[in-house]
Image (tube, helix red, strand yellow):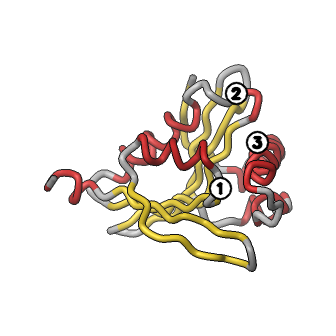
């Protein structure tokens, strides 16, 4: 598997494939949490292209997953982690999150997932993230926010 930085805003073909994988991945999450109001599930191609995010994509025979984030000098905020459902349980998501943690370096990394998304929560727990809060982002749609703080880990 090859992981590299990509720019969907400047590559129409990549953006279309990425949107397809994103919709498929979030459809699986929607089924798992019993709610399809996940914003990226309904995102348009233009919205995906114009999102002010950095992207890493994982390629095998084609695009198998991607992760997108925003960052400051002190924090990396993961906005999306998507894996082609045909490639689940192959370590794609774990590899993408690890790649972002490496890029984050000393900065803390935050991410949110559906409270009922057991597999995503297990992934983040297994990578050293700590559940920090739960929030009802829209009526009856709860997310759990996670934090990975290298400073806290190194002090333990």
Please tell me whether mark 1 or mark 2 is closer to you in this view.
Answer: 1
- Counting from the top left corner in percent of width and height, residue 47 is at 78, 65
Determine the CA span between mark 1 and mark 2. 21 Å
- Counting from the top left corner in percent of width and height, residue 145 is at 50, 65
Side of 33 where 78 appears, left or right: left
- Are dots 1 and 2 in contact, CB under 8 Å? no
Q: Residue at x 61, y 33 (%)?
A: 58
**Tag 3 secondary structure:** helix
Q: Residue at x 61, y 66 (%)?
A: 143
Residue 147: image tag: none
Please tell me whether mark 3 or mark 1 is closer to you in this view.
Answer: 1
- Counting from the top left corner in percent of width and height, residue 18 is at 76, 44
Relative to 68, does residue 127 appear above or below in the rendering?
A: above
Relative to 135, does residue 91 appear above or below in the rendering?
A: above
In the foreground, 28 or 34: 34
Earlier in the chain: of badge 3 and badge 1, it is 3
Crowding at mark 1 (Cα within 10 Å: few <14, some 14-19, many 20+): some
Residue pointed to by mark 1 = 116
Residue 14: image tag: 3
- Are dots 3 and 1 in contact, CB under 8 Å? no
Residue 87: image tag: 2
Crowding at mark 3 (Cα within 10 Å: few <14, some 14-19, many 20+): some
Earlier in the chain: of badge 2 and badge 3, it is 3
Q: Residue at x 78, y 54 (%)?
A: 30
**Displayed quadrant of residue 40:** bottom right
Residue projecting furthest to the left: 155
Side of 110 where 1 appears, left or right: right
Side of 150 where 113 appears, left or right: right
């Amino acid at each position: 598997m090859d992981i590299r930085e990509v720019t969907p805003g400047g590559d129409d073909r990549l953006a279309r494939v990425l949107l397809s994988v994103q919709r498929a991945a979030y459809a699986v999450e929607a089924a798992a949490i019993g709610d399809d109001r996940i914003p990226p599930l309904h995102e348009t191609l233009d919205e995906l292209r114009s999102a002010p995010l950095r992207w890493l994509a994982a390629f095998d025979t084609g695009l198998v997953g991607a992760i997108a984030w925003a960052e400051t000098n002190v924090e990396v905020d993961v906005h999306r982690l998507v894996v082609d459902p045909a490639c689940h349980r192959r370590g794609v998501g774990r590899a993408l999150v690890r790649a972002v943690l490496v890029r984050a370096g000393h900065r803390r990394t935050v991410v949110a997932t559906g409270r009922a998304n057991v597999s995503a929560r297990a992934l983040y727990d297994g990578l050293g993230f700590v559940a920090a809060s739960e929030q009802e982002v829209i009526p009856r749609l709860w997310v759990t926010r996670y934090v990975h703080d290298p400073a806290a880990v190194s002090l333990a």
